[in-house]
Structure formats: structure tokens, C-alpha cells
Image (spheres, coloured by chain):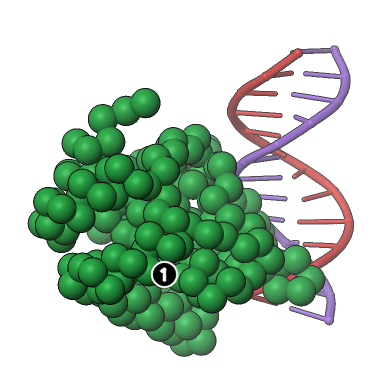
Chain colours: A green, B purple, C red
Amino acid sequence: MINRRELLGKEYNFMFSRQLLEEIGDIADFVELKEGEEVIDYGQKADFLPLILTGALKVMRENSQGNEMLLYFLEKGDTCVSMLNCCMRKQKSEVRIISETDTVLALVPTETMERWFVEYKEWRTFLMQAYYERVNELISVIDGMAFQQLDERIFNYLKDKAMVLGTTQLHITHQEIASDLNSSRVVISRLLKKLELQGKIKIRRHQVEIIDF
DNA sequence: ACATTAAGTGATT
DNA sequence: AATCACTTAATGT
């Protein structure tokens, strides 16, 4: 087991009172995930809400034919509000969540969460804020799909990814980009080449470096 | 040396 | 922007 209090304090000190931090530390289930491990799958139910202490998660969405794409990343200090439906209202998950990096989560049981909602103003504020941020994020996802050219989407995707990973050197294949954006490898390769010619990125095998942040 | 996987190219829809 | 068919390059066994 790890220094859970220290980890908690690091991201949530300014958000939560000492008392609430204590409660989280006592009650939440702290889990460590390796990169690529699944938090929840489509159709699953959950009875917890994850607070992200370190690392990042990616939230995926798929259609009935099994085409899957990335919705957005979640970082330390975030929580996954799309799981609120899932755990509070006993709904099945509409998304799949996977760890993008090694990650530490604090899983808060539903009942506890509901009690906190009554007892702690900061907790209400936190959830409302998280909700607000996700709605905005989703709107930009829609903008991307509806109004942007694919090359813009790729570039934004790369910048997002660089942001959550904290590096401009991304270890990624063209196929992986294609999967996340629900496109095909061939067109990704061509558009990456175009972005490179524009001086925005640098392409190496298994790697894309962002130049023009 | 051979197989596998990633990436590049031209043509077509 | 997607798909097909094919080539080339890099990497693992």
C-alpha cells in the first residue's frame, strides 16, 4: 500500500476540507492500475465513483457495429461524471474507461458519495464543477466531429495526448491514432505527413513529436 | 534468412 | 475521407 493521504492531499487539498479528506482516506478503496487496464466496460454497472489521484484515463465510446473512438481524457484531480448515472441511478455504462498511463484511483462507494453530497458543500461544488467541465469537453468533441477537418482533429488529439502525458514526444503508431479517431491508418499517415510539412510535428517510427504547441 | 508489423504510395470511389 | 492493392522499411526470432 502507498501513501494514500499524501497522494490525496496533493490533488485535493485546496478543493476539500480536512475532514472530507480524512473520510476519503478512510473509506475509499485505493487501486493502482497499469497502463491499458480497464476501469469499466460498456453495459457494466458500477457502485463506485473514481477520483483520479495520479495518471490519466481515457473514455471511449462505441457504436453498434463495434466502431470505437476516444471521447476525452481524464487527469489527476478529475472524476468521471459519466459514471454518476451509472452508480447513482444504477444505469449501465455508456462508455468504456481504460487507463492511459499507470494510474492511482480512489474509488468512492455510491452510498458514501450520496451522504457526502448532503453533508459537504465542497463535494457538491466538486461534482458540479466536474460536470460542467465534461459538458464543455463534450461540446468540443462534437465541434471536432461536425465542423473540423480531420487534420485539425489529429493535431488537437496529439496536443491533448501530450498534455495528459506531460511530454511532446508521443510513442504512438498511425494505426492507434486512426483507432482513437475512428478513421483509417492510410489517411492518418497522409495527414500526418501534411502536418509535418507544415512544421507542426515531426514524425519518426513509432513516434510523433509536437513542434508547434 | 524469414516472418511480422509499421508506414508509404497510387489509383479508385 | 475511405478503401484497395501493393511496396518499402524496420524489427524480432
Q: Quadrant of the N terminus of chain A?
A: top left
Dot 1: element: loop
User: Which residue is nearer to you in this view: A118 or A156?
Assistant: A118
What residue is shown at x 28% (from left), y 43% (from top)?
A25
The x and y percentages for residue A14 are 10, 56
What residue is shown at x 19% (from left), y 36% (from top)?
A6
In the displayed structure, would residue A174 be above or below residue A191?
above
Q: Is residue A40 left or right of residue A202?
A: right
Q: Tag 1, which chain?
A: A
Q: Amino acid at mark 1?
A: Val
User: Which residue is nearer to you in this view: A116 or A169?
Assistant: A116
The image quadrant that residue B7 belongs to is: top right
The x and y percentages for residue A186 are 66, 59
In the displayed structure, would residue B8 be above or below residue A111?
above
Pointer 1 residue = A81
The x and y percentages for residue A76 are 30, 51
Q: Is residue A36 left or right of residue A113?
A: right
